[in-house]
Amino acid sequence: MREGVCCQCGMSANIRSFYLLNGKMYCEPCVWKASREAKEKGEPSEYASLTDNSVCVRCGASRDVADFALVGQQALCPSCGQLVQNWPYPSWLKIGLACLLALLVIALLNGRKYFHAGRSLYVGERLVDEGHFAQALPYLQESVRIAPESDKAVLLTARAALMTGQVEVAQKALQGHSGGHFEDPGEDFRTVDALWNQANSAFEKAEKAAKLEEQDGHAAEAARLMHEAAASYPQAAGLGAAAQMYDEGAAFERQDYDTFVSIAQKQWKEYPGPGTAAAVSSALACKYATTGDPNYKAQSEAMLQESQRRSQQDPESKKDFEEYAQRIRYRLDSRNIITKAEYDQKFRSGQTPAN
């Protein structure tokens, strides 16, 4: 057993009674004072208790010169060290440990997908909080795919989808969660509910506008309703595009063909496709019918050819082209401007369509 001597007061005792501060040995009362003084001087003031590694912590055997070897963090004599290192653990304990390790492996394998879902949810939620709804949606959809009953994952997915105009994605997530029922609707639910009602109201107006647009003499009212729908739910970019298309119909209805051409060309530039190309052709055909300027006719025919070219890859677009191409060619050939309903009544009620 080793002895220690305090450098301050000279007290001698077992080394375990002393503390080390800045390389010096102190007894307990002196180390308090020395630590306080060191702190006032701006010097290190932390101290640590000393251990006597010349004494075996298990059997109490001691040495006067050398320390015992440490097993773990404890000083043990050779006999006790060998005994501890070769401790005969009972079979039931070994079997129990093996079973616990096996259960841990199974739990980790089965829970891996839930860890993935949790990570996706964390990333998606952070992106939603930052207002990056389009970027958040794929992460949140992955969370819902793995855990469709998670209130948080479903509501965040619905919110991100609604904020990017993807109503069908939001509906699928909500309906997959107990048919849209939530036990404890909180702030997240109220936010999604308000967005859902906003989107539904907008699409109800859009549906009314679509029905009016099919009727002669109601193009202006249809355009007004579609603009209201787009304004009430701006997240759905398609409503804004539809409102511009309905403006074409309103311009045609009031015989403002310059505006018709302007809107159709803007739509073609923003959304190039067979339908927008046909709209430009139709508008230019109206200008030719009213002015007789052959330049308008040539431009109209060129856009009609472009519409035909773009429609060949899709059966539905090809079918639509065959329907409106006849009406545009009739307008170019006759310089007579009539509505679709008038054309259908005149040429598609059992009579041979005009060439």
Image (cartoon, rainbow, N blue to C red):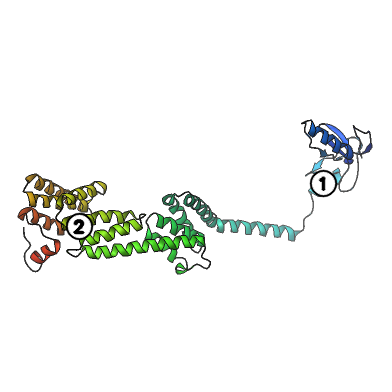
Res. 154 in view:
no
Location of residue 91 in the rendering, given as x and y in whole percent from the top left corner: 75, 59
Mark 1, residue position? 82
Sequence-first tag of 2 and 1 = 1
Q: Residue visible at 79% across and 52% down?
A: 87
- Asked if residue 285 lies left or right of residue 250, the reply is left
Compare residues 166 and 143 and report the one nearer the observer. Answer: 166
Q: Residues within 10 Å of mark 2 (few under 14, many from 20)?
A: many
Q: Residue visible at 11% across and 52% down?
A: 286
Picture quadrant of residue 334: bottom left
- Asked if residue 303 lies left or right of residue 2, the reply is left
Res. 213 in view:
yes
The amino acid on which the numbered mark 1 sits, given as a three-letter code, is Gln
Location of residue 231 in the rendering, given as x and y in whole percent from the top left corner: 33, 56
Element under label 2? Answer: helix
Image quadrant occupied by the N terminus: top right
Mark 2, residue position? 250
Compare residues 167 and 320 and report the one nearer the observer. Answer: 167
Image quadrant occupied by the C terminus: bottom left
